[in-house]
Image: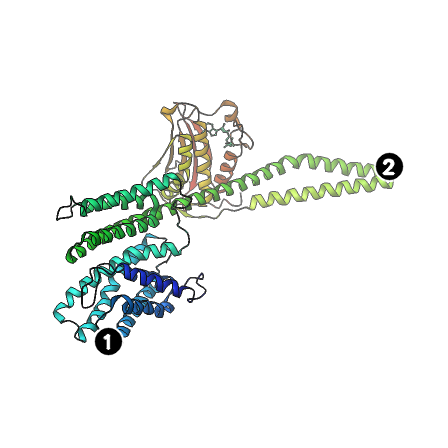
């Protein structure tokens, strides 16, 4: 139940007006005595409203149906029958919306492919069940013979299904407030031109099918798939929903203008249904894919943040290490000076100052010690990890690097590797650091040989898997190679020289080792080992 609907009351006039307007516009090719039309968009509006608002909107749905029947449809049945039949429709659709949302978990934001599939299944099933009761009621009071039951039900079903399939997604997309992943907002001239091109294509196809050149078979209908598919691919679900609605509207106008007979209209509506289902499913897949890409980008920036934090931690550790010695020396000089000052009975002021100096130095020492203890105890969260999955995640995260540096990044994973024991985020960080270094090393202009391979195979050492990164770059420079894993060693103008040192401490924290190797053709390999899950020694107290 959405929180953004404070009360139904604000919705009532807008909903009733929209229901009536849609019913009036689509009241064509009605088949008496029930005046069933080949397209019933009010059903789509009603379903959308019931999905968003919930069961408490059933009376409003009933009111809309009553208003339409009394003001537009004018059925030849007594009023009590209209009241009862519309009660059945409103309750039936309300119940279906409740089952879809509450029992089957339909998200009215239509954020997943699953939601669109559920909506389409609901759109097909609900009119079948509800329509059977609705038409049976009218048959029971003798409006038409039972022999017409099947035909009437089919016509009713087609009109309702197409109404829901085309309009409900538009209603739900419009009510979610934004049009995610679509670029209708802030439309540029390009966007307007694109929109005009789709409209033109829809218009042209309809003209081919209904204009003076049209054959009796309306053989160009399939061309309508082109703009629908193009919009779905470019703009996801929101685009698909709008394109289906625009195509349906164009089709209805064409049918009206040219006076197509009713049987043909139903045939067109079935084709339209196929088009709408195709576009919606495609649009949902495209939207879902974009969402996954956005989630990956988010994870990437999480990782970058984690990496910056670790770098800061490493820097603190390095500083602690570097400051430890001069501080210890300063402390012992201050203690010696204090002793001498006491022995030689120097001024009490000097003794007092030396006491304070020693106390301050001891305090600084305690701060550094506790910092080092903290760094040493920082454990990683171990879990069994699939090596293939780990590398696949890294390749996905490294995809932008491949683009930025014009390199290809591939994986070579030996078959049936056992799971390793490790912290996924930390190990990703190691692999990504190595891949980033490799990509940056290949920035030199030699486009023929820009290849990075992330590999995994059983390690020579029992109980371990070897993973690593191989590149076809220029190799390590001599100075760097000697101090490769020491912090702050870098050849890059903006480098911190911390990446490899962090990578090594993570690998060693897992009980493995990280080494580098130069291959005969100048290639560089960084290789590290990680214990197989279940075979790891307790390395945390190292
Ligand atoms: P940073 O990347 O910040 O400079 P790193 O510790 O990651 O720090 O790397 C240290 C240095 O090692 C780099 O500056 C670079 O000179 C060298 N290096 C690392 N990986 C490679 C590689 N694959 N090929 C050539 N040189 C590399």
- Specify whether 243 is left or right of 423: left
Residue 35 highlighted magenta (yes or no): yes
Query: For the residue labelled by badge 1, is the local secondary structure a helix, a strand or a loop?
Result: loop
Magenta segment main secondary structure: loop
- Specify whether 253 is left or right of 112: left
Point out residue 350 in the picture as x, y percentages from the top left corner: 84, 39
Residue at 25% x, 75% y is 81
Report whether residue 507 is seen.
Answer: yes
- Specify whether 360 is left or right of 379: right
Q: Nearer the viewer, residue 224 or 330?
A: 224
Q: Is residue 239 above or below residue 477?
A: below
Residue that carries the numbered disc 2 in the rendered image: 344
Label at residue 70: none
Report whether residue 104 is seen.
Answer: no
Disc 2 versus disc 1: nearer the observer: 1
Residue that carries the numbered disc 1 in the rendered image: 78
Q: Nearer the viewer, residue 5 or 37?
A: 37
Tell me whether the residue at label 2 lies in contact with that at label 1, contact meaning CB atoms closer than 8 angstroms.
no
Q: Earlier in the sequence, mark 2 or mark 1?
A: 1
Specify start and end residues of the magenta stretch as a single range: 31-37
Point out residue 217 in the picture as x, y percentages from the top left corner: 13, 48
Q: Nearer the viewer, residue 192 or 306?
A: 192
Q: Quadrant of the N terminus?
A: bottom left
Query: For the residue labelled by badge 2, is the local secondary structure a helix, a strand or a loop?
Result: loop
Point out residue 401 in the picture as x, y percentages from the top left corner: 42, 34
Residue 18 highlighted magenta (yes or no): no
Residue at 18% x, 54% y is 259
Q: Within 10 angstroms of label 2, few (less than 14), some, or many (20 or more) residues?
A: few
Q: Is residue 238 above or below residue 440?
A: below
């Amino acid at each position: 139940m959405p929180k953004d609907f404070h009360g139904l009351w604000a919705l009532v006039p807008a909903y009733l007006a929209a229901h009536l307007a849609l019913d009036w516009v689509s009241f064509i090719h009605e088949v008496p005595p029930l005046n069933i039309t080949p397209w019933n968009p009010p059903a789509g509006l009603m379903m959308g409203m019931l999905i968003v608002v919930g069961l408490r909107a059933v009376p409003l749905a009933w009111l809309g149906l009553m208003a339409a029947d009394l003001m537009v449809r004018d059925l030849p049945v007594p009023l009590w029958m209209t009241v009862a039949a519309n009660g059945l429709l409103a309750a039936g659709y309300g119940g279906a919306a409740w089952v879809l949302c509450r029992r089957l978990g339909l998200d009215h934001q239509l954020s997943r492919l699953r939601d669109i599939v559920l909506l389409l299944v609901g759109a097909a099933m609900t009119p079948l069940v509800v329509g059977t009761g609705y038409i049976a009621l009218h048959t029971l009071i003798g409006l038409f013979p039972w022999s017409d039951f099947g035909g009437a039900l089919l016509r009713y079903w087609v009109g309702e299904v197409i109404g829901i399939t085309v309009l409900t997604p538009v209603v739900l997309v419009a009510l979610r407030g934004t049009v995610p992943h679509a670029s209708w907002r802030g439309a540029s001239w390009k966007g307007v031109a694109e929109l005009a091109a789709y409209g033109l294509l829809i218009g042209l196809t309809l003209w081919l099918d209904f204009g003076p050149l049209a054959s009796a078979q309306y053989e160009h209908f399939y061309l309508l798939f082109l703009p629908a598919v193009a919009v779905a691919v470019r703009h996801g679900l929101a685009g698909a929903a709008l394109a289906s609605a625009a195509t349906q509207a164009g089709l209805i106008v064409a049918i009206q203008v040219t006076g197509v007979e009713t049987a043909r209209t139903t045939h067109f509506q079935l084709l339209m249904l196929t088009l709408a289902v195709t576009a919606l499913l495609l649009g949902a897949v495209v939207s879902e894919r974009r969402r996954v890409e956005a989630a990956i980008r988010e994870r990437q920036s999480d990782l970058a943040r984690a990496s910056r934090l670790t770098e800061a931690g490493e820097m603190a550790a390095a500083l602690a290490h570097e400051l430890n010695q001069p501080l210890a020396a300063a402390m012992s000089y201050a203690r010696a000076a204090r002793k001498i000052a006491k022995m030689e009975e120097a001024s009490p002021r000097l003794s007092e100052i030396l006491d304070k100096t020693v106390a301050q130095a001891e305090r600084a020492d305690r701060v550094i010690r506790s910092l080092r203890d903290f760094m040493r105890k920082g454990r990683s969260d171990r879990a069994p990890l699939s090596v293939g999955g780990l590398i696949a995640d890294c390749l996905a995260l490294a995809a932008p690097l491949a683009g930025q540096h014009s390199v290809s990044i591939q994986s070579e994973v030996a078959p049936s590797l056992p799971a390793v024991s490790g912290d996924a985020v930390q190990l990703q960080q190691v692999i990504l650091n190595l891949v980033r270094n490799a990509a940056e090393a290949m920035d030199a202009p030699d486009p023929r040989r820009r290849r990075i391979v992330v590999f995994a195979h059983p390690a020579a050492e029992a109980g371990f898997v070897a993973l690593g990164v191989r590149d076809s770059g220029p190799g390590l420079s001599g100075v760097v190679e000697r101090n490769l894993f020491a912090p702050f060693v870098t050849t890059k103008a903006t480098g911190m020289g911390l990446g490899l040192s962090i990578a090594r401490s993570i690998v060693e924290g897992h009980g493995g080792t990280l080494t580098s190797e130069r291959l005969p053709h100048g290639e560089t390999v960084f290789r590290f080992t990680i214990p197989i899950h279940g075979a790891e020694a307790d390395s945390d107290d190292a």
